[in-house]
C-alpha cells in the first residue's frame, strides 16, 4: 500500500486494485464513513453542514487518525468486498516518508493494526520507489531517487541496501496546487478551489517557460474576488511555470544538498547512472529537463512513475525474506 497524501495505491499479487484519491467523506455528527476515494473526492469542497470531507494525510503523514483508519478500511473493502475474515490473515507493507518521526511512524502502524492486519511492515518511500523501477538496491553502487509526491519530496542516495544520504522536504504536489491558487487570486483576481487548481496543474502545469510540445491554454471559470461576478480566464503554461518557480527551486536546492552529503565514489556512480525521478511530480512538464540543466546530471523519468512506490511495496511484500533488512 502506497498511503499517499494525494492518492492511495493498493497492489495485491502485482495488480493495481485501488488507485484513488486519499479522501474520506464522513457524517459530521456521528463520524460514520459515507464514501472513500473517488466518490469522496467528488464531494470534496461541495459538501453541506451534515457531511465533511477529510484528507487524512498531510505532508506525507497521518494528520487525522480516525479518518485515516476509516479510509484504509474502506479501500481494503473495495479490494475484497467480503473481507470480514481477510483482515486477520492479511500481510501489509506500507511506505512512509524517509523523514518521518517515530510518532508519525507509530501512527501509520497503529492505523494498520486497527484495521486488523496480521503482519505489518513499513518501508521508506525512496527505497520502495527504487525497488519499483527495477534498481538492484543491494548492489555496491550509488543510485539517487527523487520521489515527488503530494505532501513530501523524498530524495535518497541508495547503496548496498541502505540510504546513504537523504533529504525529505515538505514541498511537493500540494504546494504546487496552493501556488496556483494564490497566483490566480493575486494575478487574475479570481477565486478557485483546490480541485480547479489541480486541474490547471494537470492541464498546463510546467517547470519551463519554453516547451517543445506546449499544451493549449486552459480556461478557468470562477467568481471575481471583488464583485463575485463570474469570470472566464485563459491560463497558459508559461504563467504556471512562473508561479511554480519558488517551489521547484526548493526541490532543486534539496537535490543539491543531498548530493553535497554523498561520498565521492557514490557521487561518481550517480553522474554515470543519472538520477531517477518518480511520483506524481515527475509528470510535471519540463521538470526533468530543468533539473538536468540546473544540476548537470541526467534526470530519468521511468515508465509509470506514479506507481513506482506502490510497485516497490508489492515486490517487498512478495519477497519479505529477501528484503527483510529494509522493512521496519
Image (tube, rainbow, N blue to C red):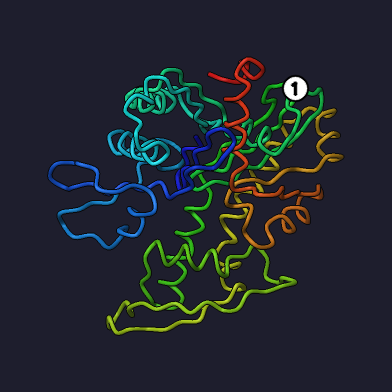
Q: Where does the image place residue 216, in percent across and percent down from the top left?
A: 60, 78
Q: Please name the residue that numbered disc 1 is placed on.
A: 138
Q: Nearer the viewer, residue 297 or 321?
A: 321
Q: Could you tell me how many numbered marks the image carries?
A: 1
Q: Residue furthest front?
A: 82
Q: Where does the image place residue 287, in percent across and percent down from the top left?
A: 67, 57
Badge 1 crowding class, 10 Å Cα cut-off, few under 14, some 14 to 19, many 20 or more, is: few
Residue 33 higher or lower than 211, as above or below: above
Q: Nearer the viewer, residue 85 or 48?
A: 85
Q: Where does the image place residue 157, in percent across and percent down from the top left?
A: 71, 32
Query: Position of 82 compared to 8: left or right?
Result: left
Task: Name which residue lies at 41% across and 43% down.
Answer: 58
Q: Residue 135 sits in which quadrant?
A: top right
Task: Name which residue lies at 71% across and 55% down.
Answer: 288
Residue 269 higher or lower than 27, as above or below: above
Task: Name which residue lies at 15% across and 54% down.
Answer: 50
Q: Where does the image place residue 309, in percent across and percent down from the top left?
A: 59, 38
Q: Nearer the viewer, residue 303 or 80?
A: 80
Q: Nearer the viewer, residue 269 or 283?
A: 283
Task: Name which residue lies at 45% across and 18% down.
Answer: 119
Query: Position of 79 compared to 34: left or right?
Result: right
Q: Secondary structure at mark 1?
A: loop
Q: Residue furthest left?
A: 29
Amino acid at each position: 500500500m502506497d498511503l499517499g497524501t494525494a492518492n492511495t495505491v493498493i497492489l495485491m499479487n502485482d495488480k493495481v486494485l485501488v488507485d484513488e484519491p486519499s479522501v474520506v467523506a464522513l457524517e459530521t455528527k456521528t463520524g460514520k464513513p459515507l464514501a472513500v476515494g473517488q466518490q469522496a473526492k467528488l464531494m470534496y469542497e461541495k459538501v453541506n453542514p451534515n457531511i465533511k470531507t477529510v484528507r487524512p494525510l498531510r505532508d506525507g503523514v497521518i494528520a487525522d487518525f480516525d479518518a485515516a483508519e476509516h479510509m484504509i478500511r474502506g479501500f481494503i473493502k473495495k479490494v475484497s468486498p467480503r473481507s470480514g475474515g481477510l483482515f486477520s490473515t492479511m500481510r501489509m507493507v506500507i511506505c512512509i516518508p524517509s523523514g518521518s518521526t517515530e510518532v508519525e511512524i507509530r501512527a501509520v502502524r497503529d492505523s494498520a493494526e486497527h484495521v486488523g492486519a496480521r503482519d505489518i511492515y513499513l518501508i521508506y518511500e525512496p527505497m520502495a520507489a527504487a525497488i519499483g523501477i527495477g534498481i538492484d538496491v543491494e548492489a555496491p553502487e550509488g543510485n539517487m531517487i527523487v520521489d515527488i509526491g503530494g505532501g513530501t519530496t523524498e530524495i535518497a542516495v541508495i547503496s548496498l541496501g541502505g540510504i546513504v544520504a537523504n533529504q525529505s522536504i515538505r514541498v511537493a504536489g500540494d504546494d504546487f496546487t496552493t501556488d496556483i491558487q494564490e497566483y490566480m487570486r493575486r494575478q487574475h483576481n479570481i477565486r478557485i478551489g483546490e480541485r480547479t487548481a489541480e486541474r490547471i496543474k494537470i492541464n498546463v502545469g510546467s517547470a519551463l517557460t519554453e516547451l517543445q510540445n506546449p499544451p493549449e491554454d486552459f480556461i478557468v471559470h470562477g467568481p471575481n474576488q471583488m464583485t463575485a461576478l463570474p469570470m472566464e480566464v485563459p491560463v497558459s503554461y508559461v504563467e504556471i511555470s512562473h508561479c511554480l518557480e519558488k517551489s521547484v527551486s526548493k526541490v532543486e536546492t534539496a537535490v543539491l544538498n543531498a548530493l553535497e552529503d554523498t561520498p565521492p565514489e557514490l557521487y561518481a556512480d550517480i553522474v554515470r547512472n543519472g538520477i531517477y525521478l518518480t511520483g506524481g511530480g515527475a509528470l510535471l512538464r519540463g521538470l526533468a529537463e530543468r533539473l538536468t540543466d540546473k544540476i548537470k546530471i541526467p534526470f530519468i523519468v521511468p515508465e509509470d512513475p506514479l506507481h513506482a512506490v506502490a510497485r516497490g511495496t508489492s515486490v517487498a511484500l512478495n519477497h519479505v525474506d529477501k528484503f527483510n533488512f529494509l522493512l521496519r
